[in-house]
Amino acid sequence: MAKKRGIMSESLKVEIAKELGFYDVVEREGWGGIKSRDAGNMVKRAIEMAERGVAQKK
């Protein structure tokens, strides 16, 4: 079975998890321990950050 390669860097995931307030769960249980809602909020936040970056380049 091939290892899945993540889209977000580890440092970006950590930054967002800290910002959203559930990094303590990641430290205790790893990324598999977060709630699906938290994972969705991470993705939403990463998209917002990317959109802001694209808008600034225009």
Image (tube, rainbow, N blue to C red):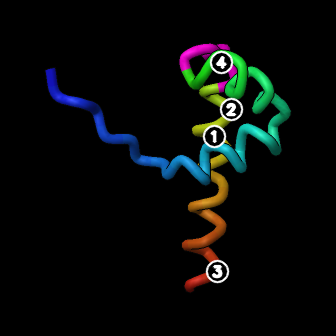
Amino acid type of the residue that numbered disc 1 sits on in the rendered structure: Lys
Residue mark closest to the camera, 4 vs 3:
4
Left or right for 26, reference 7: right
Quote the CA–CA distance across marks 3 and 1.
19 Å
Residue at which label 4 appears:
34
Sequence-earlier tag: 2 or 3 = 2
State whether the magenta stretch is mostly helix, strand or loop: helix
Residue at which label 2 appears:
41
Left or right for 51, reference 28: left
Quote the CA–CA distance across marks 2 and 3.
23 Å
Quote the CA–CA distance across marks 1 and 2.
5 Å
Amino acid type of the residue that numbered disc 2 sits on in the rendered structure: Asn
Residue at which label 3 appears:
56
For the residues bearing labels 3 and 1, Cβ distance under 8 angstroms:
no
Question: Which element type, helix, strand or loop, lies under badge 2?
Answer: helix
Residue 40 location, quadrant: top right
Position of 56 relative to 43 (above/below): below
Quote the CA–CA distance across marks 1 and 4.
15 Å
State the residue in front, 14 or 41. 14
In the orientation shown, which residue stands out farthest toward the bottom?
58
State the residue in front, 51 or 3. 3
Residue at which label 1 appears:
44
Amino acid type of the residue that numbered disc 4 sits on in the rendered structure: Ile
Sequence-earlier tag: 2 or 4 = 4
Q: Quadrant of the C terminus?
A: bottom right
Residue mark closest to the camera, 2 vs 3:
2
In the orientation shown, which residue stands out farthest toward the left?
1
Quote the CA–CA distance across marks 2 and 4.
11 Å
The crowding category of the residue bearing disc 1, from other C-alpha atoms within 10 Å (few below 14, some 14 to 19, many at least 20), is few
| Residue at the image point whose x is 31% and y is 40% from the top | 5
Q: Residue 39 location, x and y as percent? A: 61, 26
Residue interval drawn in magenta: 32-38
